Amino acid sequence: MLPGTQEPVCWKKKGRRGKLMRLFDKLMKKANLDIQAEEGKVYAPISGNYILLKDIADGVFSSGVLGEGCGIEPTEGKVYAPIDGTVATIADTKHAIGLIGPKGEELLIHVGMDTVDMNGKGFTVKTAVDARIKAGQLLLEFDMDEIKKAGHPVVTAFVMANSSDHPDFRIVTGKTYQAGEAVGIL
């Protein structure tokens, strides 16, 4: 702290941001994607091949009981916000994150199958419950090799839990997307 202030030394110096905070800002900008979210669009939360939900080798997801959506065969171990919204939940084991969109959309991103067994090993959360998020914001990192080493598929489920309340929700599958590309509509 600067004497007589409540600000850390690195935060402000003579009315300008300190070097440490500028470096932090620069690193965070690189961590996040630059998306100007359009209302009604959903953006790829993960780089990879987007497959039909029914092609996920897990009956709970493939049956659609948890909602409509798709599977993602990831090519990179990063999960970004697919919409502007709020973080509703993060699994204690860090393998899944739930989001609430501006019109009450309940999105779930579940990294890998049966990864709950990993108890958080190989997962790093980059956000918090109740955080306001922007499309393209880094939410979670995961180690694909660690997941495979634990004997689990890395295929990720991306579903809208309340898709029956949002009948226009669609994700275009059968394509490979980079995180941040438009993949569907709400």
Image: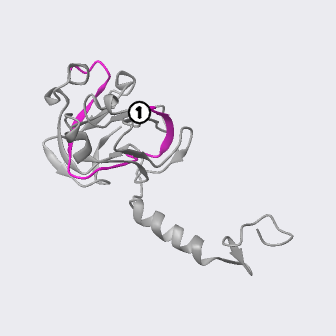
Q: Position of residue 118 (x, y in %)?
A: 33, 33
144 and 176: which is toward the camera: 144
3 and 179: which is toward the camera: 3
Say left or right for 37 vs 69.
right
Where is 148 relative to 135, above or below?
A: above
Residue depicted at x 16% and y 50%? 176
Q: Position of residue 157 (x, y in %)?
A: 27, 33
Looking at the rendering, in which quadrant would you find the C terminus? top left
Residue depicted at x 48% and y 71%? 26
Looking at the rendering, in which quadrant would you find the N terminus? bottom right
Where is 117 relative to 126, above or below?
A: above
Say left or right for 66 vs 88.
left
Does residue 104 appear in this view?
A: yes
Does residue 168 appear in this view?
A: no
SS under mark 1: loop
Q: Which residues are magenta?
A: 63-92
Residue depicted at x 82% and y 68%? 5
Q: Is residue 93 magenta?
A: no
At label 1, the amino acid type is Thr
Q: Is residue 73 magenta?
A: yes
Q: Which residue is mark 1?
A: 93
Say left or right for 92 vs 169.
right
Where is 17 relative to 90, above or below?
A: below
Q: Position of residue 140 (x, y in %)?
A: 40, 47
Q: Position of residue 147 (x, y in %)?
A: 25, 40
10 and 52: which is toward the camera: 10
- The residue lying furthest to the bottom in this view is 14
For disc 1, the neighbor class at 10 Å (few under 14, some 14 to 19, many from 20) is some
